[in-house]
Amino acid sequence: MRQRLLLLLSLATLLLLPNAIRHWLFNHYHWLVPFLIWALLIMLTAAAEWRHRHHEL
Amino acid sequence: MNFDLTTLLLIGCGYLLSLFGAAWLTERKRLPERLTRHPLVHVLALGVFASAWTFYGIFGVAHASGYAYLISYLGASAAFMLAPLILIPILRITRRHQLSSLADLFAFRFRSGRVGTLTTLLMLFISLPLISIQIQALADSLPMLNQQISSTQAAAGFCTVIALFTILFGARHASLRNSHNGLVFAIATESLVKLVALLTIAGYALFAVLDGPSGLLDWLAANPEYVQHLQQPPQADHWQILLLAFFACAFVMPHMFHIAFTENLPTESLYRASWGIPLFLLLLALAVPPILWAAIKSDAIGNPEYMVLQLGQTLELPWLSLLAFVGGLSAASGIIIVATVALASMLQNHVVLPLVRVPDNVRFYAWLLWIRRLIILFVMLGSFLFFQFIGHRFDLNQLGLLAFIAFLQFLPGVLATLYWPSASRNGFIAGITAGFAVWGLGLLLPMMGLLNTDLIPAQPADKGYPMALLSLLANILMLITGSVLFPGNRDERLAADACMLNALPRPAGHNIQVLSDAEFVTRLTPRLGAKPALREVRRALRELHLSAGQLNPLDTLRMRTQLEQNLSGLLGPVEAAALLQPLDGPVDGGFKARDVHLLEQQLETYDQRLSGLAAELDQLRRYHRATLQRLPIGVCTVDAEQRILFWNAELEAYTDLTPDMTLGTRLDQLPLPWSDLLARFAATDTLHQSAECIELAGAQRWFSLHKARLDDTPAQGMVLLIEEETQHQLMARKLAHSERLASIGRFAAGVAHEIGNPVTGIACLAQNLKLETEQPEVLETGDQIVDQTKRINRIVQSLIRFAHTGRQEGPEHFEPVALHACIDEAIHLITLDSRSRQQHFINDVPPDLYIQGDLQLLLQVFVNLLNNASDASPAASEIRLNSDQTEHSCRILITDAGSGIPQEHLDQLFEPFFTTKEPGKGTGLGLPLVYNIITQHYGNIEILSPADKKQNKGTQVIITLPRLQQSNTAPEQPEADGEGLSG
């Protein structure tokens, strides 16, 4: 159930909240900002994967 | 700058040969396994996503649309970051059911060969442009380095080398599920090469062309329009649909599906890819702006799609150009190789095998391999022809977008597979048909210039993207409508359950008609051939840890499932299911005994932890199961057909039949005598049956049976309780025997009393008769009468003594008795007997051994036993009496060297009037008398024969009596008589 909700949330983000992504990519801050946010997301995912590997696998 | 043709050939072929070498070394296990099986290798292999489009075409997108180029990277990154939602579940399904492609997955989920074929053909149709892009990238890049090379020649040579590599390393195993470690390692190497190449070029662009970070900042400050252009939002919101398309492409494209799911990567590697691939793509994406700006600064944007190549040419740096060329070559070759292998497996399973029957006279596995190799050649040829006649008319960017939007049409099917069990095959076919129809009419045909629309041919411009969204919506709508209007059948529902997220697959409910492994081989031989059938059956047996021979119903079902999974890896799920279909009997919807056991097995091996209420219910199930399993009484449950559902440990101990041997079998199929006992009882209306006697291993055992009907459960069967009564029965028999002896004793006392008086009268009369006559005949007759009356008196006295021992007077009349002295007295009495045969009696009983008892009765015991020993022993032999003692008891052992007692007489020795002596010599009351006396003294007597097992002779009588503690005897030891007897 938790996974289904997360999937729906993700798809909704992709389709229904374009402004968030538009703001992320096409704002007029420093040109590196989209990459920094992307790197932050990767770090979060890596942390989640590390936690999963050490607690569930 | 123009490169020498030889140099280009050497570098290009050298690079590809080095890939051959890496793959070859990996296959031959010449490279350390910790390197080739490292998760980093698996993650890098998934970098095959970054194709020539990503290496070359992306610069065209960045130049035209700014940061919109990130969409492709972000879509794929999102798919990997959300790996637990889609990638991991797909991996579990494909691994469990041995599925090797998306077509296999859909064909398995929707239980339809048509679905598999449709998916395969569509996949081939939209993969051709994708492969064509890779060929085009190389065909366009080579003439840039050497104008004498024609793009057609370059494309033909490239396709030939890649086809050779693919056949050598991508089609090595008949089973599609076998890992191609060499291929994976080579693809990982390619990913590393293209990453290093692009980062090196980006590094040179940043530090050499743009004069480092500070120089870049200065240049951007001087030319702010380039940053603004990069950050310029697109005119329309079409990038959302593109984002979704790349999200889908990350696992739907054949090469991605193949590397992620078919090559048996460890689950751990896929979890690591959830951040590894986004990081890989981030590095690739980060390299784009510096190269773009360096190209702009250097005026190397004549063809923006190849600016990474042109940068080196413009700056006249041969190494930079060659690095870009090698990077592009690795990006293009990687995807072609894997996509071709994946398409070949799909075409084999869903197009060739349903159409072509395996010839009888061929080697099955080799035939499969060669079919796949031919398909690889066919796909390569098709891709080349597509490039030659269609592809080269379009930009990489345009062709790529067209293909990516087409791949998006499979996303609803994948999500329905994982998340919507009500989706049906009709809905899927309707959805995918509608989606592709809209895609074809709205994008493909206008782009090809075959339809008159306002869309500019060869340009999927902004108006094309709403069409992509429309195709997706049409797909989803038709999928839902079709599934609601035409729901799936039972098979589909079962497959849907098996594909659901965290699914615990239900037993399939097949009624299989096979009883042994040989029968499996026989049934599979017509389609597979004798040797492959035997090999597959043996493999399944090995994997299930079953032995060959007769299989119980549960094992046959497990064999069927295992065979279907293994053959699915070989032939695809549709062919595998069709192959095993003849093994099935008619399906009835009823609850099956084996369902319970299969469910239990699946729960035990369920590889995901249950959570919440499910976990608590599972704990409850385990508790109830343990309770039943460990009950100290046999428990067996059966369904309505009397098939065994449950067989607990106690019953296993009774019967020596393990649950594996019994579960799923009918009660009447159990070995004798259990089939007779249990099936007969289950068939009767009685709920209780006591002390049924059966013979097990030559011994009699008694069991009480109870049952209760389970009418309110799905199984509609009954529970049987089996309780062993053997000990109770033996005790009851012993009690009855004692009672019989006691009654005989009472009877004997009465008889003795009644006979004694008349016999005394007869003896007197005979004496008188002798006094009154001188006739010798009469005198002799009188003597005979007197002798016979004496004999009667002796018998009567024995009877009276026997009867008296049964009085059970109790311990208050007992007094301490020294056993040694008692035995000496008995020996003395025996030696006085005129019939004594002069054996040597040896009394080794210690003088200080005392018991509480009646001296006269004990004397009688030893006289009787020694008499018997003397009668049975040869003259001058030894009769030894010795003892051992514990704290509370002592044992007296009387051992002779006589002829022993036949085995068949041992059970009857203590029965009154049983004797083996000659008529007139024994009354048959001696040993019963002994038995009674010993019992009266709270002791026990047993007789072992032969005592000397080696020589098979002799008898040993063992008397066990409670021992009198030393403190009760020594101080007041009375001297009863001169013989030293106490009492």
Image (spheres, coloured by chain):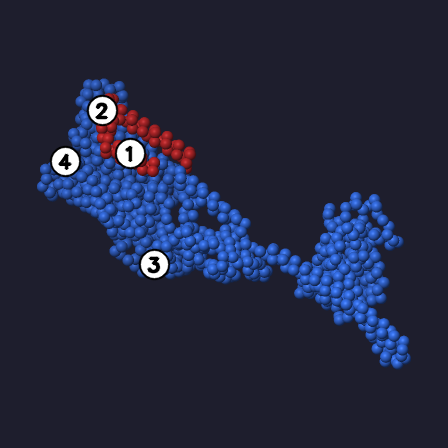
The reply to whether label 4 and label 2 mark residues of one chain is: no
| Colour-to-chain, red | A
The reply to whether label 1 and label 4 mark residues of one chain is: no
- Of B224 and B748, which appears nearest the observer? B748
Disc 4 from disc 2: Cα separation = 25 Å
Establish if B194 lies above or below B777: above
Q: Of the residues shown, which amino acid type is indicated by label 4?
A: Lys
Q: Is residue B17 visible?
A: no
Disc 3 from disc 1: Cα separation = 45 Å
- Of B368 and B106, which appears nearest the observer? B106
Q: Residue tagged by mark 2?
A: A27
Q: Is residue B416 left or right of residue B502?
A: left
Q: Residue at x 26, y 56 (%)?
A: B356
Q: Is residue B891 left or right of residue B557?
A: right
Q: Residue at x 18, y 22 (%)?
A: B225
Q: Which numbered disc flags the more N-terminal residue, 4 or 3?
A: 4
Establish if B322 lies above or below B933: above
- Mark 1, secondary structure of its residue: helix
Q: Residues within 10 Å of mark 3 (few under 14, many from 20)?
A: few
Disc 1 from disc 2: Cα separation = 23 Å
Q: Of the residues shown, which amino acid type is indicated by label 2?
A: Asn
Q: Residue tagged by mark 3?
A: B586
- Mark 3, secondary structure of its residue: loop
Which disc number belongs to residue B463? 4
The answer to whether the residue labelled 1 contacts the one labelled 4, judged by CB atoms less than 8 Å apart, is no
Q: Residue tagged by mark 1?
A: A9
Q: Is residue B840 left or right of residue B199?
A: right
